[in-house]
Every structure is written in C-alpha cells, then in structure tokens.
C-alpha cells in the first residue's frame, strides 16, 4: 500500500510517475478515469485551508469518491481521542484519508493504524502536495525539466514548504537557494536526512553561505544574502512569514524577516524568463509586494489551480 506522507521517501521514478499523470487529468477533466468509484475518503483537517481543502474535495469527487470533510475539532480527536484509535475506527469504514495537522507523526501513525492510503495535506514538517504542484507548474510553464535550474526561496526557510523543496532537490537535481536570516534556516539534520554533504564554500558564493551537495547533482545553498540568491534564478518562490501555529511569534517574525521580500527590484536580478511563484495565501507588503504579485498573478493562480490536477495524479498514484 502506498501513502504520500513526505517527499523524502519518493524516488525519482515516483516523482516522474506522479507528475507524468497530471496532463491526462488536466486535459480531460470531464472524461478522465474515476478510480475511486464506490469509495469513501475522509479529509481530516486540524488547520485552516482554502486551496488544499477545495482542491482535494473537488478532486476526490471527480475521481469518483464520496468525501467526508472532518474538522478535527468536530470529531472526538479534538477532545483527545488518540490518533491511533481514530485511525483504527476510520480505517474500517473509509478507503483513503487526506490529513492536515500539526505533528508529522500524526500522519505517520494514521497511515500505520488505519491501513488505508493516507496523504499529507500539510504538517508542521512538510507540504508535499504543494511542492509537487509547484514543480509541475514550473515545468508546464517553462516547457523544460527542473533539473539543473536555480530555485530561490525567500523568507522563512525553516518551515514546511522549504523542507519539501529540499527533499525534491535531493531527487530532481536542481539548485535550491534558501535566503533567510540564519535563525530561519533549516536544521542541519534535515539536510543530512536529504543525503546532503556540507561542502567548502567555493568562490562566487557569499561569505556566509553554507552549501550542501546532494547525490542528485543538485545543491542547497543557505545564505542571508538575498541579492546573491536571486541573481540568475529561474524561479523566485516565497511563503508566508508566519506559518499556521506560529501566530504568537508574529511580531518577532515580521521584525526578523523584514526585507526578505520578493519585489520588482529583486525580480530584476533573476533570469529574464524567471517565474515568480507563491504557495498562497499571500500577505502583500510582507513576503511579496502587491505589484509583483499582480505582475505574476497568471503564474501564481495557475499554480493554485494546478493543486486540483496534481492531487488527482497523487491520489491515482497512491491507489495504483
Ligand atoms: N497553499 C495552501 O496549501 O493553501 P491552503 O492553506 O489554503 O490550503
Ligand atoms: N508555511 C505555511 C504554508 C501555508 C500553505 C503554513 O504552514 O502555514
């Protein structure tokens, strides 16, 4: 049985198997196969969501499933029933689950105890469906694979979204530059899990840069030097400064991350055909300015739409 709990466990073949299914679902939205006909899938969400919730609910229905949206606070899970017991009960009734929660261990335990295909719809550690969508969107719009390209992530580089980008770079062989103050860099242990080897800082990199070489041929460069990180980038990418669950740190984060913004001046440093993407929701004037969001709205909202098509591909891969 397959699950999608993390990008860490995917092979290159898995990435390509998922991404290779997307066009079929996107082009034939009204007539594609319905592999979940007769099934019931649960969506268990402990955090807010617009894109993930709607795209999964619509997508699962269009794949043929009945869908139960379960706000974690409305079921006994929210009153302290263990995730193991919730999984054992639901696993006897449903055919698959999509879970958005805090602890990564919760999706892992659910997968183990439910015995049904389980998909991570965001945890504190990872957002695998988002990054698969982002890679598809990049390759779709550029018409070429992401291997060898430069992806520059700006902002809170210690949260779930950049973690999934790191695991993607570890398989797909692109350069991921994470531009953030040092206290918002990912832990070394994450780079080690991704198979990275910390290398010498080579000429051309900023003095503070820490460069992790990946077996895929890609590398992850951690730096506070936003200008360097954006120079020659194929993709400029950002996410919120204050992730869900970090609201009590809002004021501190706005102070610390001020300046780590994608704006028109920064975009000028990237390649002329560079894409600007944002997983959304966007906070204009914080991680991205309003003008840049407008300039690149066509890409950013196509990226949001692609959640629907890519997640159908993910579900189809999980049940195949
Ligand atoms: N990008 C994303 O996951 O959006 P939601 O939080 O609205 O689902
Ligand atoms: N890092 C953000 C992603 C939102 C889609 C969060 O966890 O809130």
Image: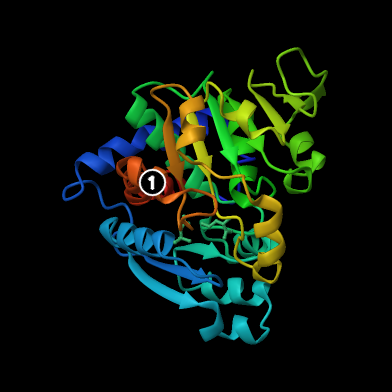
Give the x, y percent position of residue 234: 48, 25
Residue 123 found in image quarter: bottom right
Give the x, y percent position of residue 90: 52, 74
Residue 286 found in image quarter: bottom right
As helix, strand or loop, the secondary structure at mark 1 comes to helix
Q: How is the image coloured?
A: rainbow
Give the x, y percent position of residue 75: 54, 84
- Is residue 317 shown to the viewer in this render? yes
Residue that appears at 71% across and 34% down: 194
- The one nearer the camera, 101 or 198, is 198
Residue at the outermost front position: 265
> Dot 1 corresponds to which residue?
291
Assign ligand 2 to one image quadrant: bottom right
Tell me if 208 is positioned left or right of 258 in this view: right
Give the x, y percent position of residue 242: 61, 60
Q: Is mark 1 within 8 Å of ligand 1?
A: no
- The one nearer the camera, 210 or 126, is 210
> Is residue 212 depicted above or below 243 in this figure?
above
> Is residue 235 depicted above or below 96 in this figure?
above
Considering the image in quadrants, where does the C terminus appear? top left
Residue at the outermost left position: 30
- Is residue 15 shown to the viewer in this render? no
- The one nearer the camera, 216 or 62, is 216
Q: How many marks?
A: 1
Tell me if 294 is positioned left or right of 249 in this view: left
> Is residue 114 depicted above or below 240 in this figure?
below
> Is residue 115 depicted above or below 267 in this figure?
below
- The one nearer the camera, 89 or 259, is 259
């Amino acid at each position: 049985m397959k699950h999608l709990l993390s990008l860490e466990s995917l092979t290159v073949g898995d990435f390509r198997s998922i991404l290779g299914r997307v066009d079929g679902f996107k082009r034939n939205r009204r007539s594609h196969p319905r592999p979940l006909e007769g099934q019931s899938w649960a969506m268990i969400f402990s955090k807010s969501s617009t894109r993930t919730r709607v795209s999964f609910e619509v997508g699962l229905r269009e794949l043929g499933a009945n869908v139960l949206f379960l706000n974690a606070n409305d079921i006994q899970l929210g009153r302290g029933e263990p995730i193991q017991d919730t999984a054992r009960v639901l696993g006897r009734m449903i055919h698959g689950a999509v879970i958005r929660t805090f602890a990564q261990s919760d999706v892992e335990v659910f997968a183990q105890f439910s015995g049904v295909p389980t998909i991570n719809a965001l945890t504190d550690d990872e957002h695998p469906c988002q990054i698969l969508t982002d890679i598809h969107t990049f390759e779709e719009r550029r018409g070429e694979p992401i291997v060898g390209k430069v992806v520059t992530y700006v902002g809170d580089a210690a949260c779930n979204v950049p973690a999934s980008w790191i695991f993607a770079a570890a398989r797909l062989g692109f350069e991921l530059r994470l531009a953030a103050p040092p206290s918002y860099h990912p832990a070394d242990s994450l780079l080690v899990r991704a198979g990275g080897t910390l290398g010498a800082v080579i000429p051309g990199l900023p003095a503070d840069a820490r460069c992790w070489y990946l077996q895929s041929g890609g590398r992850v460069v951690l730096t506070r030097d936003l200008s360097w990180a954006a120079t020659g980038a194929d993709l400029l990418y950002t996410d919120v400064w204050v992730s869900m669950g970090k609201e009590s740190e809002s004021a501190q984060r706005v102070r610390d991350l001020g300046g780590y913004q994608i704006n028109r001046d920064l975009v000028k440093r990237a390649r002329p055909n560079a894409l600007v993407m944002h997983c959304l929701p966007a906070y204009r004037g914080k991680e991205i300015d309003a003008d840049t969001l407008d300039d690149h709205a066509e890409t950013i909202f196509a990226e949001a739409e692609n959640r629907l098509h890519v997640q159908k591909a993910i579900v189809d891969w999980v049940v195949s």
